[in-house]
Image (cartoon, helix red, strand yellow):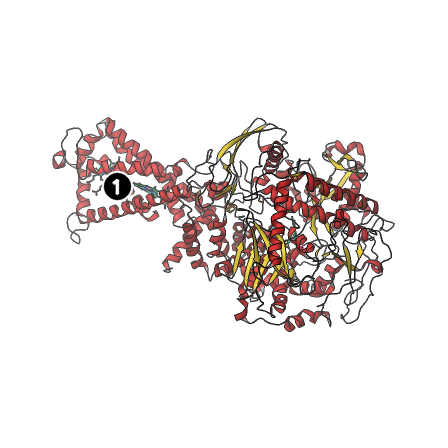
Amino acid sequence: MKLTLKVWRQANATAQGEIKTYPLDGVSPDMSFLEMLDLLNEQLVTQGEEPVAFDHDCREGICGMCSLMINGEAHGPEVTTTCQLHMRSFSDGDTITIEPWRADPFPVIKDLVVDRSAFDRIIQSGGFISANTGSAPEANSVPAPRDKAMRAFNVATCIGCGACVAACPNGSASLFLGAKITHLGELPQGQPERWSRVVDMVGQHDHEGFGGCTNIGECASACPKEIPLDVISQLNKDLRTAMKQGL
Amino acid sequence: MAGSTLHDGLTPLNGPSNQISDDAQGFYVLGENIVDPVAPAGPIKDRWTTRKFENRLVNPANRRKLDIIIVGTGLAGGAAAATLGEAGYNVKSFCYQDSPRRAHSIAAQGGINAAKNYKEDGDSTFRLFYDTVKGGDYRARENNVYRLAEVSANIIDQCVAQGVPFAREYGGLLDNRSFGGVQVSRTFYARGQTGQQLLIGAYQAMERQVAAGTVEQFTRHEMLELIVVDGKARGIVTRDMVTGAIETHLADVVVLASGGYGNVFYLSTNAMGSNVTAAWRAHRKGAYMANPCYTQIHPTCIPVTGSHQSKLTLMSESLRNDGRIWVPKNVADCEKDPREIPEEDRDYFLERIYPSFGNLVPRDIASRAAKYMCDEGRGVGPQVAEIGPDGEQRMVRRGVYLDFADAIARLGKHGVEEKYDNLLDMYARITGENPYETPMRIYPAVHYVMGGLWVDYHLQSNIEGLFVTGEANFSDHGANRLGASALMQGLADGYFVLPNTIRDYLADGPFEKVAADHPEVVAAQRAVEERVSKFLAIQGTRSVESYHKELGAIMWEYCGMERTEEGLKLAISKIRELRADFWTNVKVLGASDNLNQDLEKAGRVADFLELGELMCVDALNRRESCGGHFRGESQTEDGEALRHDEEFAYVAAWEWGGDSNEGGQPVLHKEDLIYTAIEMKQRSYK
Amino acid sequence: MAASGAAFIGFVLGHMYGNLKAFGGQEKFNEYAHHLRELGEPLLPYEGFIWIMRVGLLAALIVHVVCAVVLARRAGQARTVKYAVKKNKGSSLSSRTMRWGGATLLLFIIWHLVNFTFGKVNVQTGETGAAAGDPYSLLVDTFDVWWMTIIYLVAMVALAFHLHHGTWSALQTLGLTNTASSRQRAKTAGWVLAVVVAGGFSAVPLSVLLGIIEK
Ligand SMILES: Cc1cc2nc3c(=O)[nH]c(=O)nc-3n(C[C@H](O)[C@H](O)[C@H](O)COP(=O)(O)OP(=O)(O)OC[C@H]3O[C@@H](n4cnc5c(N)ncnc54)[C@H](O)[C@@H]3O)c2cc1C
Ligand code: HEM
Ligand code: HEM
Ligand code: SF4
Ligand code: F3S
Ligand code: FES
């Protein structure tokens, strides 16, 4: 396959970026999207041009490191991560525009690489259960209802990729936030800190500069792990309960 | 435990090893034997309890004054950072990803073992211990393995308390399954994402400590050197991958939890960034590298499709429970649509060769059998280029069928979907083929390394103050790892073992702080700066990637599933050549003062080029087959792995002896494996 | 936002119901308008109810607009560099046009109040205030002018859009959509409200224009 790639190039965080166009030949439909970029980079190195920087690690859809806006869609046209997207989803002759996640709390570091440490800080603000090592009771002493445990699991699969933010017209991280609130809030172990957790995490989210959610729903359709919108409803519900308690 | 007797751990059941063969002659120097200086004795079941009690305590007021560096935020490093931070130490945590949550532990699918005996099926600490030692083909240290089995139950309690959403039964209690050919149900799981859920648990516990101010986290920081002052590990040199700043971080103790080095093979199931650099830098500073050749090859991975391939993807082993593995009987059929090959022309080779275990034989056996089929020319799928035993390039089909047709007939498509849909969907996504219609294709791939830095019972390396945990150390799996036990080891080390052993070391503190301008510190920093400049200065013609690919091809051919004296020697000379070429002809573009992924990779590949050679030397020396290490020269008449316990029941701990291209030779220190609780047995799966 | 929006929904439903009295003829409609002013007497003074409602609506409007402005500003600051290419695949047009729709509604409401409540502008006769006629005549005179009807209909389209997303959004914001089925119901409610309210409101101007309602 032959492609025309339009790639965002930006030397560093403060530099002006621009979209550069590269023709690329010899792309196989069996390549993953990132392997296609590897090919581009081999070509650039041969030409003496610096390769395109992009984030990735596991390349199997679980670490959440890869992050590309492909033709205006976070992680591209399929419901999966960029690393699991394959070139057979494109056609010979296509033009593909590749941009980094755009959100001010995710500043660009270089080319397609952004800084997502805001997510870590949101977790630090309360996205955990305080269970000191060694003090845990016997695991089966507190049964967890299966349906709640299932819901917790389904949303605990969030990989922290940030596609939800990238896709949201408001630049909101509410889906990410809601996934964590719901995961911990559905488990018996998560109850003691439930109300302070949601207040603290939402506070940190806003403090980081993410936008507010107006329930547009782009986030859920961009999410490679199919986290459903109801986590945002849960987030709102928990927040309201917390506020009623005067937190 | 058929046929095995329980021993109390008070009397040795075997003597020291006595190696007669010397295949690696000329490639190494024999050093002195070593022993684990802190190995406990007494009844095996009391050893860890006694040791925990005997280890000295650190006064809480002093903990704040003690600085701990932890490199790695996987299960081993993340759990340790959380626990040590909570205890009040001053922890600095490092990882090369943009967040600790992305450490490679996240990719583990299957599950984690624990001797909870919730199913009342006869499981116990002793049985888990026994299975793990046997699974490791009697090349693991029994002290460590027993301790691992002992703390396994606490891990589950800890994770559940943190909110890890393990699978549950209808009654709300934890579910478990049997895994990897074990007779008891002891594997806890969270659908196919166990590693992810465990890691998120550890990550969140660690972030809680970051908020509490006890842990400081350094992401996108790569450790490039170990700082040793007066024989003690006192810090590390890192490169800030965003700004390029070469920084020194000083501490009272350094913990490496930097994961495995399977990427020396280029293609593996490891994450792209997994590397040996942290461990290798420590090795070059004097830490012993133990059993580097022990590699686990996983039989069910998605095969290579072409030269563009950057990594391989694991398909959970559970597929072998219902899928049947076969290749065409006739080479001529290999190109055909498999559905058109009639039953009588199919060779269900595992069922044929191993009638009693069939498709469920252990990983190494299943892997090797698939390789032999493809070597014979009966592989399926696209032809891919590789170097052959003669060193020439050739085209071979590397794949065997894993067929669900019978399972679909038996369970219905829906039944198969229910059990495996996430795996089959992943397969379909990657290959573009529908596994419900055509048989899947699988091939073995490098998955895990049992080798790693040598540590004692306290997880301390031979460099004082340098502790090593998780996949980065060599300690608990012997020559082969059973499924679901690496996660167990990482968390055991991080939550329960290290925090209890490191305090014995730290009890001598507070220590005098090392000055930032200490000559050793300055020298270490300068060495890193020079190395970085060197990469950029070479300005050769070949990309870093191409060296890595070539090294991987050599390793896979000669130091992969089957190793021979001749092949290993050829590999060593090829690696030496390649390494020499690398240092004169590599091309790294860009600058060092910002994000430069090629530069990062150059450092990693440079270390792989040294490690690869040591792996070959280790494999060459070990003229026996054990676990994942299969020497062509050491097999039974039926082609099964043949151990030589009298010669090789030892841990091979290698000391850095300088670059072989400059005349250096690694020094071999042997640590005898003396069993007191279990007797060594030859395994058989026929 | 959700609370003020919900208050608006309540109001427009009531208001629409009131407007439909126009089909009952001049007397009925005027009686209704008068009744509104007497509501709650003698507990409340004359026009007491309507003033309470006005104060409430004004407060809701202020809250609503302030929230909308704050949200819009936050969204603007959260993405100062725009995408060169951006596709939408999971959202409705209505959800993405809330701000435009809201602004349209704001302009409409201002004009509408001038038109019917505070200014009482009879565009046909050019008279204002009490001289513009009783509420019913004013209504009919207004919609006898085709472009007035158009203005109102455009506003109703904006309202329909706003309600389509707003209803679902308010329910989601109130945390009432925690399952897939409740989410579906909330979306349906959005459709129903949008069609009923916008349709109900539009019925009057259209009927006047078509001569079904006349003086
Ligand atoms: C696909 C796959 C599936 C698996 N499935 C299972 C399973 O089902 N059950 C099981 O028990 N095991 C499984 N394993 C094995 C198991 O996942 C790993 O062995 C284990 O998670 C390793 O954990 P770790 O903490 O030692 O290292 P890792 O999780 O690999 O973490 C390494 C850490 O070190 C950091 N690091 C590395 N080098 C540097 C450096 N130079 N500077 C700074 N930081 C550095 C990294 O950033 C990372 O944080 C699987 C492995 C793979 C690849
Ligand atoms: C006065 C002019 C108005 C303006 C400027 C305005 C603007 C907005 C904006 C910007 C939103 C925002 C958020 C989003 O995009 O979802 C919104 C939400 C909403 N609006 Fe309005 N609007 C106005 C009038 C109305 C009216 C008249 C109604 C009802 C009839 C209404 C009902 C709602 C509802 C229900 C919501 C959803 C609240 C939520 O998400 O919690 N609005 N409005
Ligand atoms: C075609 C549609 C509409 C018609 C025919 C209409 C008609 C009227 C009339 C006749 C009045 C005066 C009632 C009185 O003074 O007793 C009125 C008042 C009012 N209308 Fe409407 N209206 C319409 C749509 C709307 C919409 C969509 C809104 C809001 C979003 C709205 C908000 C108001 C308000 C706030 C008042 C003032 C009430 C008061 O304080 O007295 N109207 N309308
Ligand atoms: S919610 Fe989905 S899109 Fe958002 S960070 Fe998690 S996995 Fe990524
Ligand atoms: S797209 Fe944005 S507005 Fe809310 S529903 Fe999703 S975060
Ligand atoms: S690289 Fe890990 S999810 Fe894509």
Label 1 sits on residue: C15
- Residue B28 percent location from the top left of the image: 80, 53
Q: Residue furthest left?
A: C131
For residue B279, which quarter of the picture?
bottom right
Quadrant containing the C terminus of chain A is bottom left
Q: How many marks?
A: 1
Residue placed most toward the observer, A246 or C194: A246
Chain that bears disc 1: C
| Label 1 crowd bin: few (<14), some (14–19), many (20+), radius 10 Å | some
Indicate whether B238 appears above or below A61.
below
- Residue A215 percent location from the top left of the image: 41, 44
Residue placed most toward the observer, B119 or B245: B245
For residue B121, which quarter of the picture?
bottom right
What amino acid is labelled 1 in the image?
Answer: His
* Residue shown at 71% from the left, 49% from the top: B611
Q: Is residue A144 visible?
A: no
Q: Is residue A183 left or right of residue B556?
A: left
| Badge 1 residue CB within 8 Å of ligand 3 | yes
For residue B35, which quarter of the picture?
bottom right
Residue placed most toward the observer, B181 or B97: B97
- Residue B142 percent location from the top left of the image: 74, 64
Quadrant containing the N terminus of chain A is top right
